[in-house]
Image: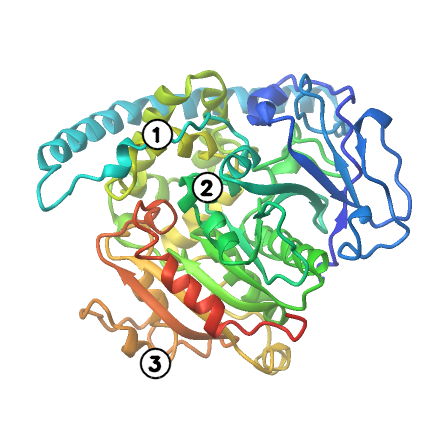
Amino acid sequence: MQPRTPTATRPISWKDDFSISPLYTSSDLDPFGDKNDEIRRCISTPSSSVSLPTPALSGSTSDSSDLNTDESDKLLVKPDSTTHYVPRRVHRIQRHTSEHVALWLTYAVSSVLSLAVVLCFLPLALFQTAVRNHTDKNRRGSDHIPKNDQEWEETKEQITHDEAYYARHWGYSCEAYDITTQDGYVLRMYRINKKEADIKGKRAVLLGHGLFQCSGDFVLNEDKSLAFVLADQGYDVWLGNNRATATLDHTTLSHEDPEFWDWGIKELALYDFTAMIDHVRQATDSDKIAYIGHSQGNAQGFVALALQPEIATKLSCFIALAPAVFSGSLTSTFPIRLLINLDDRWYKLIFGTTAFLPLMMTAQKWLPPRPFSVLAYSMFAYLFSWWDRHWLRRRKVKYFQFTPRLVSSRLIADWLEGWGRRGVCLHLTGSNGSHADLKNRLPSEKVPLAVFYGSDDYLVSGERFIRTFAGYEKYDASGHFIPDPVTDHAENNLFPMLNLIHVERIPDYEHMDTIWGHDNLDTTYPGIFKVLSSSAQWDNKM
């Protein structure tokens, strides 16, 4: 079934009455209650007329459904400073009392067991972080870790969950759009440009976030954030959010029901990725847009291309930062290996069938930002073996107000099955249709692909990934490729719609450094600018 062009949600009413889940409160799951009241929420409308409460309305409706024709085609909704975002009211699925009791007991058991697991690993994580910090402190100032004057710069930023605040603070405009996927999930997108700039005719770039993350991760490096430097280069920058990361809204399902969380990497690819691509194309009146994805953000793009190759006709280029296609050496280490080998029944018992570890959001909501950043950083560093050596450490308190974000337990199960057990992301290998059918669906022109990865990224293997493309030898930056029967000479099987045109292996970089590194202006960004300006296949309208 082909995903249709995404339609808009109903306008948000900030005066609606909302119910509270008996299992967990909406406010505990949703940390976005402090969204700054100055944000302009632009809700695209497919119909000719939409009514809104008078105090909330700014702007007017239009009879045209073309999102790019006039500012009057946008509904600008400005919530009161005293109100907060809460999920829309959707009636829960009617169940028998016994079913409600069973669901409650399942949630209670998984909550207790998952909390016990976290408490077991947290002391180990904190100890490892303390040892690492002590070692780095002794080395700081040496040739290994030079001092960075930026570490002590005064930014005068607030600590908030609001992407729009950071955009405005650094002199950029930010608009929020709510779009709806074919399967009913409401996704929030942000559009960032230089203030007072004419956005008409600009080339559009969409940024996609990684697992447990959200669009905010692209605006946290002050004026050196990827979203801002792209806007400075003259691009129309869009930030995407997958389902459940920025809103808990759905057209018919309540986030309090397990059915809301029944999705994995395939749904993110076929519905979320395509809905965001189509919305940006429609809003900017573009045939093609550029896509930049980090980690899972590019994985869902690759899965979408593998399952629906015709999507390639909508992309001017694909830039993959830390591509999450093949697993790195981390899968053979403790404690990740324990999770990978966990029996499916035990996995569901411990982590449930709804949101994965929702207690993370509860802790993020109620703990002060700095203590929470220490806890969250320690756990992620312990589990995924990435460190802050290339970050400005003063930024960590901001990073972990946008990380973690909610994902489904089924999505984590997909990653454990593909990345963990098979060594490759699900839905990228095997038959996705007959060879003749696939050939007929391929675009006439391949999409330029650029890859940026770190030499010290143990979570994913960029080297295995680029070996799936013909001519990878000229991008051999490490000098120690080993023949791999899984990937060697597989270029006709995985991504025949992509043309590898640029690879950068950045020494000492880890998984998060391609977006959070303090020196990205010298490492990652120049290559991105070059691909966008010289290699991307923009449409004739540009």
Residue 177 % position (x, y): 68, 43
Helix, strand or loop under label 3: loop
Helix, strand or loop under label 1: loop
Front disc: 2 or 3? 2
Quarter of the N terminus within the rendering? bottom right
Q: Amino acid at mark 1?
A: Glu
Disc sitting over residue 471 in the figure: 3
Front residue of this view, candidates 522 and 351: 522
Q: Is residue 522 left or right of residue 348?
A: left
How many marks the image carries: the answer is: 3
Disc sitting over residue 41 in the figure: none
Distance from disc 1 to disc 2, alpha carbons, whole Å, reads: 20 Å
Judge whether 355 appears above or below 513 on screen. above
Q: Which residue occupies 58% across, 23% down?
A: 34
Query: Mark 1 — residue?
Result: 154
Is there any visible trace of residue 68 in the rendered image?
yes
Determine the residue located farthest toward the front in the rendered image. 196
Q: Quadrant of residue 389?
A: top left
Front residue of this view, candidates 302 and 534: 534
Query: Mark 2 — residue?
Result: 217
Q: Is residue 225 left or right of residue 335?
A: right
Q: Is residue 344 left or right of residue 254?
A: left
Front residue of this view, candidates 484 and 34: 34
- First-in-chain label (2 vs 3): 2
Mark 1: give few (<14), some (14-19) or many (20+) Cα within 10 Å. few
Front disc: 1 or 2? 1
